[in-house]
Image: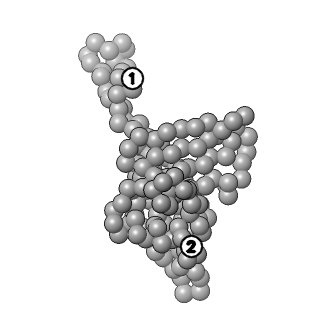
Amino acid sequence: MTAQKGKDLLLKLDSDGNGTFLTVAGLRTKTFTVNAETVDITTSESSGRWRELLDSAGMQHARLAGKGIFKNAASDVLLRQMTFQSAIRTWQIIIPGFGTITGPFQVTTLEFSGQHHGEVAFDITMESAGELLFAAQAP
């Protein structure tokens, strides 16, 4: 994958539950993380006492995070509602030059901050709540 513009990494929210995706406005930084837990099956008979892991056995999960400013856009209203309702909604993560990841996430943290001489900013974290699907970008 060649170098890509950070502004092209997009977080999109299914705004109506019917597949109408809305880009979350005001985000200045975005992060997508995928983790897979390991299942250790090492025994005293393991070769050279090296750790052994069980293939495809651990739990997988993903995290979305972003930082930005509220712009009083439709996505701002949806984020606030989702947070207070602990709602699980479908999101898309567009990774330029790589593909699109789609799946359910729940907002787990919504923080607000501001300085006397600056704008009000927010930090948001979302955790995966089910299976994620990947669609590769066409070459």
Q: CA distance from mark 2 to mark 1?
A: 44 Å
For the point 62% across and 46% down, the residue is 95
The part of the image, by quadrant, that contains residue 97 is top right
Visual colour scheme: one colour
Task: Report the side of 14 relative to 60 (left or right).
Answer: right
Above-or-below relation of 77 to 135: below
Label 2 crowd bin: few (<14), some (14–19), many (20+), radius 10 Å:
few
For the point 63% across and 53% down, the residue is 9
Q: Is residue 101 in view from this perspective?
A: yes
The part of the image, by quadrant, that contains residue 38 is top left
In the foreground, 134 or 69: 134
Image coordinates for residue 139, horizontal then vertical, percent = 72, 34
Image coordinates for residue 117, horizontal then vertical, percent = 59, 86
Q: Which mark is residue 3?
A: none
In which quadrant is the N terminus drawn? top right
User: Which residue is tagged 1?
Assistant: 55
What kind of residue is marked 2? Answer: Ala
User: Which residue is tagged 2?
Assistant: 73
Above-or-below relation of 96 to 80: above
Tag 2 secondary structure: loop
In the foreground, 129 or 38: 129
Task: Report the side of 36 relative to 6 (left or right).
Answer: left
For the point 27% across and 18% down, the residue is 43
